[in-house]
Amino acid sequence: MFGGVDEDVGGKIMSLRQTTFDTLTYQNEVKKTFQDKEEMYGMFIEVMEDFKTDRIGVIARVKELFKGHDNLIYGFYHNSCSENVI
């Protein structure tokens, strides 16, 4: 048992928890980076709402939105490789 959930499912429960943690950590990093520019964070959330239907378009939009913030672009790529994206 891990936190009340059976961990013996081919490692998927632990992997899902780690992915969720990574995703939330990334989302908080974006929010912190743009704490003085609330509209930028709002635009990011809007872009992410389109992720499941238009991955290619979202990738391009994220690159443009976060231009000059390579750490956020890298973090997006890292988190978008999983099925549990923001």
Image: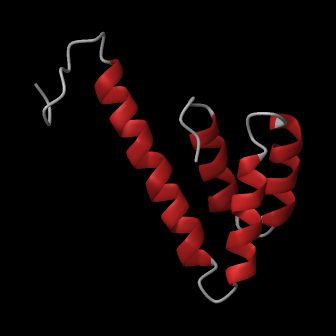
Which residue is found at the position 53% from the left and 76% from the top?
A: 32
In this rendering, would 7 be left or right of 52? left
- Camera-side residue: 36 or 53? 53
Residue at horizontal 88%, vertical 48%? 60
Q: Is residue 66 above or below residue 26?
A: below
Residue 80: x, y in percent?
Answer: 64, 38
Displayed quadrant of residue 57: top right
Q: Give coordinates of residue 33: x percent, y percent.
A: 59, 76
Q: How many marks?
A: 0
Q: Nearer the viewer, residue 68 or 38?
A: 38
Question: Residue 11 is drawn in which quadrant?
Answer: top left
- Toward the top, the furthest residue is 10
Up the image or down, 86 lies above or below 11; here it is below
Q: Is residue 47 left or right of residue 61?
A: left
Q: How is the image coloured?
A: secondary structure
When the figure is inspected, residue 55 is found, relative to residue 31, above or below; the finding is above
Identified at 85% across, 36% down, the residue is 54
In which quadrant of the rendered image does the N terminus lie?
A: top left
85 left or right of 54?
Answer: left
Asked where in the image residue 36 lies, by quadrant, the reply is: bottom right
Horizontal and vertical percent position of residue 31: 57, 72
Residue 70 place in picture, x, y as percent: 70, 61
Q: Nearer the viewer, residue 9 or 60?
A: 9
| Residue drawn at the location 81% of the way across and 34% of the way down | 53
